[in-house]
Image (tube, grey):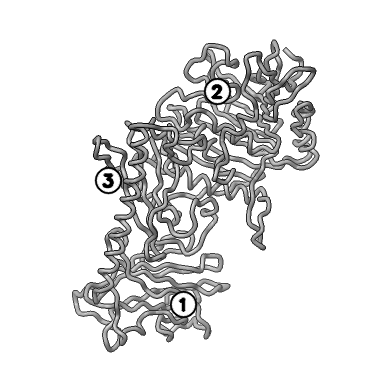
């Protein structure tokens, strides 16, 4: 054993070896943002390693720029790098590199033997991550297929270098392991060819081995890796010199993301790609708990239940357990998977939760997935005619065909393609996409027909010219441009005004009136009362007949997705200014919508 840990470079075997360039290229050229690929691949690995006895996987991504003292520890550990491979380790530490640490707890850790030439057994995760290339999964219904996704860990590093600390159960006891690995390019030294793969650890019989137990834990603590419970298992993967990708600057030119911007993006990417596993099951348990931090400060991960941009998909996903539609192939008769679709009100503005959204604007897509419940992609369908409404569908591949759909995934698992399939397998994947597209088209056609039919009905639209003034498009405290009601808080200027005329639309089969209003920035609180009433030829019916149905404000929603039941909301100085109103209409009558405002935050 080497006295001190050191770098070791892999020579090419006489019979040939996998080269580093090939490993780095296994991901191809993903169409996704690199940080999205990182989340998808690393979370998938963590979920595949879930401990069945734990209460869900705790998955975190932590970004840091080490300060001088800790930076010196990293530099002392990794420098000098394997100079013949020109990794650029020394150059990296001349600045302030970013380190992304991906952590999981509630997992089994990276167990199994340390060497790939030992007889492998189920759970040989250490050698499959750090030694082998393209090892197929050991069990059904796992997210990974051939283990190429780990290339995303190396490609995110500007010097192709990662450090791995894990705690697993091996030979009847808990064992900590720590090792670094790098991918560069093949090179020659002293007449010998090297693969470009490197490891940092104790070199034993010309093989690099990890630091173990107390030595591994002590070094992990000095490097600032997340703490590991003394009786817990899990893994930390530190990506050295992480590349954070690009963001758009104020002049719409690309620039490098800051640490905080990257953290915000990662939090959004978790929601868009992992949300089915972030939802509680019927017993209130979670499969996945997500966490992000930037330089020690927690960054909130959006809750899928609270985000209007993704809520239709969440509702459709839950419908799979209640009223799914089974999509089938007719000849030969085959169940392809289950499908559901739901509609919702489109958000007024993009939020932080939309940073990693796979599309722009209102959703009109189907989230496709298979048994691991990780999002494969969002297949676009036809758009609805009204951009105030969005819909989201979900397709879950049938368990009997999970392996077929897994084989159709590229290394990044972000599509189902049939190029490498043939015969019945290609037919299953191709037919599934065709059936999903057809279902989306039928849904949009029906929604269009419902809205068109509704627009010919007197109570829902097509107001006569004498009632056209009831459409609230003018600015002012009231929808008709006049002060809606006496207000002791009035200051002469519009405190709130309607920004979008009421529209009649069908939402999940129910007719609804939707309108929007905006609140002027105000140093104090503003209370808004949305008043709806039946419109008649000569004005507004203030007192309906006893027992008569009346239009009702069901809820108010702000741009961040907060839902306020009823027709009154108080808006503070830091609250969102844009609001959506959902109204249940009355059969046989048109409706007038107006705003009553009190600027002192009291009752209007």
Of callouts 1 and 3, which one flags the residue occurring earlier in the amino acid sequence?
3
User: Quadrant of the image for the C terminus?
Assistant: bottom left
Residue hosting label 3: 325
Residue 410 falls left or right of residue 401: right
- Residue 450, quarter of picture: bottom left
Of callouts 3 and 2, which one flags the residue occurring earlier in the amino acid sequence?
2
x and y, in percent, of residue 123 in the image: 49, 20
Of callouts 2 and 1, which one flags the residue occurring earlier in the amino acid sequence?
2
Q: Provide the secondary structure element on which disc 2 rests.
A: helix
Question: Dot 2: within a 10 Å radius of its alpha carbon, few (fewer than 14), some, or many (20 or more) residues?
Answer: many
Residue 361 falls left or right of residue 426: right
Q: Nearer the viewer, mark 2 or mark 1?
A: 2
Residue hosting label 1: 497
Position of residue 469 relative to residue 399, above or below, is: below
x and y, in percent, of residue 316 in the image: 35, 49
Q: Give the number of marks.
A: 3
Q: Which mark is residue 128?
A: 2
Q: Is residue 485 visible?
A: no
Q: CA distance from mark 3 to mark 2?
A: 39 Å
* Nearer to the camera, 396 or 521: 396
Q: Residue at x 50, y 30 (%)?
A: 106
Residue lying at the far bottom in this picture: please name it. Answer: 538
* Nearer to the camera, 145 or 75: 145
Q: Nearer the viewer, mark 1 or mark 3?
A: 3
Q: Residue at x 42, y 52 (%)?
A: 380
Q: Is residue 429 visible?
A: yes
Question: Dot 1: within a 10 Å radius of its alpha carbon, few (fewer than 14), some, or many (20 or more) residues?
Answer: many
Q: Residue at x 43, y 39 (%)?
A: 416
Position of residue 429 relative to residue 378, above or below, is: above
């Amino acid at each position: 054993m080497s006295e001190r840990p050191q770098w070791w470079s892999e020579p090419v075997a006489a019979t040939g070896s996998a080269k580093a360039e090939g490993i780095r290229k296994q991901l191809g050229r993903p169409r996704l943002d690199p940080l999205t690929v990182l989340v998808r691949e690393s979370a998938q690995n963590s979920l595949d390693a879930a401990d069945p006895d734990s209460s869900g996987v705790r998955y975190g991504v932590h970004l840091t720029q080490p300060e001088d003292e800790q930076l010196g520890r990293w530099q002392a550990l990794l420098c000098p790098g394997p100079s013949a491979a020109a990794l650029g380790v020394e150059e990296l530490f001349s600045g302030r590199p970013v380190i992304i640490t991906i952590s999981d707890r509630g997992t089994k850790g990276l167990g199994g033997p340390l060497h790939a030439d030992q007889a492998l057994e189920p759970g040989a995760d250490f050698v499959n991550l750090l030694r082998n290339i393209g090892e197929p999964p050991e069990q059904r219904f796992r997210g990974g297929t051939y283990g190429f996704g780990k290339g995303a860990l190396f490609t995110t590093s500007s010097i192709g270098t990662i450090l791995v600390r894990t705690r697993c159960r091996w030979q009847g006891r808990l064992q900590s392991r720590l090792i670094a690995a790098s991918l560069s390019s093949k090179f020659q030294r002293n007449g010998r060819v090297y693969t470009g793969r490197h490891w940092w650890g104790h070199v034993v019989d010309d093989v690099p081995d990890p630091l173990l137990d107390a030595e591994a834990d002590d070094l992990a603590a000095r490097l600032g890796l997340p703490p590991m419970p003394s009786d817990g298992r899990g893994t930390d993967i530190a990506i050295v010199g992480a590349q954070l990708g690009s963001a758009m600057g104020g002049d719409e030119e690309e620039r490098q993301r800051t640490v905080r911007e990257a953290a915000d993006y990662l939090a959004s990417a978790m929601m868009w790609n992992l949300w089915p596993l972030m939802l509680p099951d019927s017993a209130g348990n979670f499969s996945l708990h997500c966490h992000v931090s930037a330089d020690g400060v927690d960054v909130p991960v959006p809750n899928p239940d609270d985000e209007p941009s993704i809520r239709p998909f969440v509702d459709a996903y839950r419908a799979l357990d209640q009223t799914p539609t089974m999509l089938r192939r007719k000849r030969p008769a085959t169940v392809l998977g289950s499908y559901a679709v739901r509609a919702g009100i489109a958000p007024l503005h993009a939020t932080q939760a939309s940073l990693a959204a796979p599309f722009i604007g209102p959703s009109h897509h189907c989230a496709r997935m298979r048994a691991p419940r990780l999002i494969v992609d969002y297949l676009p369908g036809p758009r609805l005619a009204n951009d105030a409404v969005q819909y989201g569908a979900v397709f879950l591949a049938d368990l009997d065909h999970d392996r077929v759909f897994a084989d159709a995934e590229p290394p990044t698992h972000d599509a189902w393609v049939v190029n490498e399939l043939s015969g019945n397998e290609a037919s299953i994947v191709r037919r599934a996409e065709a059936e999903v597209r057809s279902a989306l088209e039928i849904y949009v056609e029906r929604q269009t027909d419902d809205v068109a039919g509704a627009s010919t009905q007197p109570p829902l639209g097509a107001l006569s010219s004498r009632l056209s003034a009831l459409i609230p498009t003018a600015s002012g405290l009231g929808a008709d441009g006049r002060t809606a009601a006496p207000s002791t808080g009035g200051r002469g200027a519009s405190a709130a005004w309607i920004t979008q005329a009421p529209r009649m639309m069908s939402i999940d089969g129910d007719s609804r009136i939707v309108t929007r209003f905006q609140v002027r920035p105000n140093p104090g609180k503003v209370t808004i009362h949305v008043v709806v009433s039946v419109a008649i030829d000569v004005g507004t019916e203030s007192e309906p007949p006893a027992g008569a149905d009346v239009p009702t404000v069901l809820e108010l929603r702000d741009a961040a997705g907060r839902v306020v039941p009823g027709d009154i909301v108080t808006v503070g100085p830091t609250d969102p200014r844009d609001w959506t109103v959902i109204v249940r209409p009355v059969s046989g009558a048109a409706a007038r919508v107006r705003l009553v405002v009190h600027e002192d935050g009291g009752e209007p």
